[in-house]
Amino acid sequence: MSRTILRGRVLSFHRAPQDLDDTESYLYLADGAISIEEDKVVAVGDFASADLAGAQVVDHRPNLILPGFIDLHLHYVQSQMMAAYAGSLLEWLNTYTFIEEQKFSQQGHADAVAVEFYDALIRHGTTTAVAYCSSHPRSVDAFFAEAQCRNMLMVGGKVMMDRNAPEELCDTAQSGYDDTKALIARWHGRGRGLYAISPRFAITSTPAQLEASRALVAEHPDCYVQTHLSENDAEISFSMELYPNSPDYTGIYEDYGLLGPKTLLGHSIHLNHREVGVLAETGAVAVFCPTSNLFLGSGLFDRDRLMQNGVRIGIATDIGGGTSVSMLRTLDEGYKVLQLRGQRLNPLASFHMATRGNAEALGLQETIGSIAPGRAADLVVLDARATPTMRMRRFETLIEELFLLQTMGDDRAIAEVYVAGARAKSTLGGL
Ligand code: GUN
Ligand code: ZN
């Protein structure tokens, strides 16, 4: 069996760091060796003591090797409509998004966008993402088929939406259920694909559709659930008009049995005390989408409050409401959002969140998100001297380097990417 050894500086987290001095929370090797056989890491340690016999050595020094980034919430079908000039969420959805997503009734379009989307992910060092497709089953086929070609661990699902959107985009409670069932049968657990049952949000799902979603979740407890929660004030008011018997927005999803440890709730910004308690109790994950929240003027995520109350948290780009595919740019904007809240996000905590933290949010920490024997060899190689401006900023410590990468880094700082043990970025050519 052929063996590859990646030489370089290595950083991988064991758990969430409590503060900048929490050196027990991570593994850092100044001159490390990651041994890879086929698609897995088989050993990690100092290069000086690595078994080099029969191995091909790839030298990434002085760059830093981390687990590939994980993006916990995005819309691949919005890849071509980032930077749409809209005032706020509902205007943005109605004016641009629902028009754009109608294009995915064409298989050729879905296939072409899926290729571009995965190229963009790889270019930015993201090796796993959780995605909304459009309401068309063929958009899901394109999404998973392309992931399979690239051997990527991807989570996704067909958006279910049966009201308050153009007719061309709407399914029905029954067809949304039937299509989702067929897609789960086709894609969940095939290759590295995992399915997420995806009622878009309360505004675009009738009670009958949320009832159908409840049935899907009960019948497929091993699938994820993803939806949007409390992103914007007008969205919250409209949702409560549509579901007047629920105590609050979170209560709508709670009433339909949609909250659990496999549930990912995009945004989760404006929550009352009861809602925070429900998220903590059910183990549902609040997903922080900073570039999107700033772009659409939605509000400031309250990380400290959620963490202090025991809510699980992840971080994501939310393309195309988000303004960058880059998890480095996302960490930077996340830092700034929390500054405005008077909160600090230390660089160890941010890189933990984008790797192991998001893997834990998915319950996949034994598979991805860290570098250890038995884990998938999904890796990113970061270059903190990638641009002339970055080179102007001298750094001495690992913490300074990480903070420079998140504050000034983008796709130019991604030196190489490995997916399931194979070089991925260098195969993109001129893209
Ligand atoms: N809420 C419902 N759908 C969407 C979407 O596509 N993007 C964002 N940011 N919020 C949503
Ligand atoms: Zn979203």
Image (cartoon, helix red, strand yellow):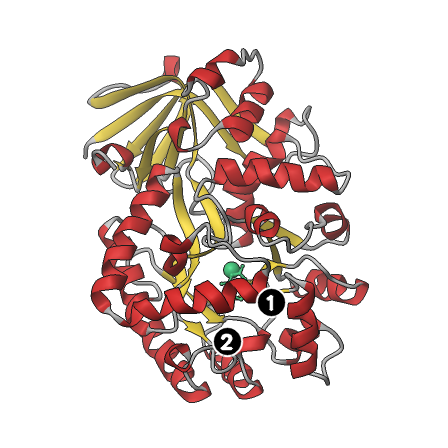
Image quadrant assignment for residue 249? bottom right
Q: Nearer the viewer, residue 63 or 87?
A: 87
Q: Pinpoint residue 57: horizontal percent, then vertical percent.
A: 26, 20
Would you call the spot at circle 2 few (<14 residues within 10 Å), some (14-19), or many (20 or more)? many
Q: Nearer the viewer, residue 191 or 331?
A: 331
Q: Pinpoint residue 327: horizontal percent, then vertical percent.
A: 48, 40
Quadrant assignment for the N terminus:
top left
Q: Is residue 55 left or right of residue 405?
A: left
Cα–Cα span, label 1 and label 2: 10 Å
Looking at the rendered structure, which numbered label has been put on residue 217? 2
Q: Nearer the viewer, residue 231 or 370?
A: 231
As displayed, is residue 354 above or below residue 102? above
Amino acid on which the number 1 mark rests in the picture: Gly
As displayed, is residue 133 above or below residue 353? below
Amino acid on which the number 2 mark rests in the picture: Val
Q: Is residue 352 left or right of residue 374?
A: right
Whether label 1 touches label 2, CB < 8 Å: yes
Q: Pinpoint residue 222: horizontal percent, then vertical percent.
A: 46, 68
Circle 1 sits on which residue? 260
| Mark 1 or mark 2: whose residue is earlier in sequence | 2
Q: Is mark 1 within 8 Å of ligand 2?
A: no
